[in-house]
Amino acid sequence: MVSPKARRTALIANVVVDAVFAATIILTLSSRPSAAQTSGAFEAFGGKAGLDRVADRGIDRVLQDPRIKDRFASSNVPRLKALLSEQFCALLDGPCTYTGRDMKTTHAGMGLKDKDFNALAEDFQRAMDDVGIPFRYQNILLAKLAPMDRDIAVYE
Ligand code: HEM
């Protein structure tokens, strides 16, 4: 039996952890370095196979995220995972060429807001944790994704 007091303490601890997590994401996304240092990042992610795992796990998390999962109801999931991995690989100066559509065309008309963008970024940060990417390399990829917000979402 868990006492109501213990349950309350656990709940408060959870809220604190979530707040710290949100603050980390906001700080990362707002730092916007002009030229993020990518040296060694592709290797640190485990090459293309490692990026495949990040894309796979990230989209699996997105598809379970009540904040944004409905957006992907009619998506071709394997194609999306493959394009994301390819895009991440190119962003980290790996040996890939991104063959998908540009971000503005892709997301035009979806009416995405900053909260949607931040939800997806949070899901991908958790996915990188899941597959054991060191924090400083997570930040390199997040810093590459952050400036894409202006083509994807409207800030309120
Ligand atoms: C850093 C943020 C994001 C990146 C890097 C990104 C990247 C991509 C890429 C590479 C594609 C495939 C392009 C193509 O079809 O040729 C795509 C498609 C798509 N994205 Fe995003 N995206 C981001 C944010 C979001 C957000 C926040 C949402 C909604 C919550 C979203 C919803 C979608 C949807 C619905 C598709 C179409 C998938 C399909 O039907 O195949 N994206 N995105």
Image (cartoon, helix red, strand yellow):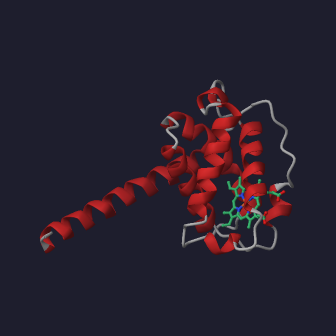
The C terminus appears in which quarter of the rendering? bottom right
Residue 32 shows in the view: no
Question: On the rendered image, what quadrant is the N terminus found in?
Answer: bottom left
Quadrant in the rendering for residue 31: top right
What residue sits 26% from the left and 60% below the top? Answer: 13
- Return the x and y of residue 129 as percentages of the image width and height: 49, 44
**From the viewer's perspective, is 105 left or right of 154?**
right
Quarter location, residue 117: bottom right
Residue 112 is situated, as x and y percent measured from the top left of the image, at: 69, 70
Left or right for 91, reference 126? right
- Where does ligand 1 appear, by image quarter? bottom right
In the displayed structure image, the side of residue 33 where residue 4 appears, left or right = left
Q: Is residue 20 among the parts visible in the rendering? A: yes
Exactly how many numbered labels are in the figure? 0
Which is nearer the eye, 79 or 156?
Answer: 79
User: Which of the pair 130/152 is nearer the observer?
Assistant: 130
Q: Front-most of 44 and 144? A: 44
Q: Give the residue at x 46% y 50%.
A: 24
Image point (80%, 73%), residue name: 109
Image coordinates of residue 28 in percent, x first then y, are 54, 47
Question: Residue placed at 45% from the left, 57% from the top?
Answer: 22
On the image, the x and y values in percent for residue 106 come to 82, 62
